[in-house]
Image (cartoon, grey):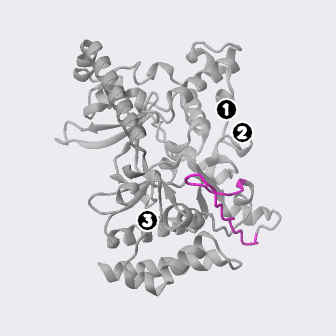
Amino acid sequence: MWRLVPPKLGRLSRSLKLAALGSLLVLMVLHSPSLLASWQRNELTDRRFLQLNKCPACFGTSWCRRFLNGQVVFEAWGRLRLLDFLNVKNVYFAQYGEPREGGRRRVVLKRLGSQRELAQLDQSICKRATGRPRCDLLQAMPRTEFARLNGDVRLLTPEAVEGWSDLVHCPSQRLLDRLVRRYAETKDSGSFLLRNLKDSERMQLLLTLAFNPEPLVLQSFPSDEGWPFAKYLGACGRMVAVNYVGEELWSYFNAPWEKRVDLAWQLMEIAEQLTNNDFEFALYLLDVSFDNFAVGPRDGKVIIVDAENVLVADKRLIRQNKPENWDVWYESKFDDCDKEACLSFSKEILCARVTVDHNYYAVCQNLLSRHATWRGTSGGLLHDPPSEIAKDGRLEALLDECANPQKRYGRFQAAKELREYLAQLSNNVR
């Protein structure tokens, strides 16, 4: 690849990189006392660092004892606050251990938004409550829409939160009862009655639902019950803890063919499970990229690790209400754009049809087929198949029809056959 860069530009690029590295080293020297202090201090025991002081404008408190007791510690470079400017997504790796367990396990910590997004959240709360961009959040929260359900309100209803986020773009009462019943940031979980939560807990629940509902997706569709999501552990202030799954799917892009076939089969199985399940909730993935999945190092299992953009449609409600064309199969339109991880969809249609091919489309186009592009590469996870597979042509034909169908309802059939074919290939290469 370096041969494509003119010599002068190549030298300039290297010079800029060296200058940036030199500047970083200078900053590290200038900040060496604070640098050493941040390395030695466990900031995860600091209430202000956890932004616990901003509650109930936060994500929960169920893990505060673990954080404040020093049971959660950053790994290596995560301790250096000087490097936070590189961590745009505010995602950290840490070690957690219970004293009685005698060991530590790896966890992932998330603030659920960038520094800018969190600052905008604060400003939004303050402006709604006081008309000013800055305020005491503790005093402001009871004066916002996040407190409208405080008191003796019995249920969280669709009318109160519809459209707040992808999770509740078209919520049913059944879905909202599930969210409340499985809400992990309360001691009284297990009841769908909103009035059983404390006022502060209701505000935390609603703020999470509006800002980034990922924790609620993980709690409502837990891995312990077989859903393909990372396990939710708890929160303290604006720091959420989930279990560490493994390396992201991208790291397997050039893995041996046998491994990639197995991963591709699992991805199609995930698409099927989220589309058709006994609970009759369709979970549509609106953001599908290699970074949003990870692979377990021991069991090789593919897990969704970013669930912010998941739309849940209640098929029972659709059948009951029978909106226009509710029983007409919906085919997602292929989007041949120049950007990475493109998807074309209508949220309104996803909410109004029982039979939808969106998840198959998203996985085939953005992860498996030759149309998948990511980090400057193309060809998808199933690139460069063995000669006998390539010569046979069936795999390429199924992938093309799944990503960009040429026949009416072709994607539905192609996805079914692709799952079967990948299962066959996976069994043959094991």
With respect to residue 188, does 133 lie above or below?
A: above
Residue at mark 1: 149
Type of the residue with mark 2: Ala
Q: Secondary structure at mark 2?
A: helix
- Residue 384: percent from left, percent from top: 40, 72
Distance between the Cα atoms at labels 2 and 1?
Answer: 8 Å
Residue at mark 2: 160
Q: Earlier in the sequence, mark 2 or mark 1?
A: 1
In-front residue for pair 143/128:
128
- Disc 2, disc 1: CB below 8 Å? yes
Which label lies toward us, 3 or 2? 3
> In this picture, which residue range is highlighted in magenta?
327-347
Q: Which mark is residue 381?
A: 3
Tell me: 104 left or right of 128. left
* Residue count near mark 2 (Cα–Cα under 10 Å), binned few <14, some 14–19, many ≥20: few
Which residue: 69% across, 69% down?
331
* Residue count near mark 3 (Cα–Cα under 10 Å), binned few <14, some 14–19, many ≥20: many
Q: Magenta stretch: residue 333 in it? A: yes
Q: Residue furthest left?
A: 102
Which label lies toward us, 2 or 1? 2
Can residue 228 be seen from the camera position used here? Answer: yes
With respect to residue 297, does 210 lie above or below?
A: above
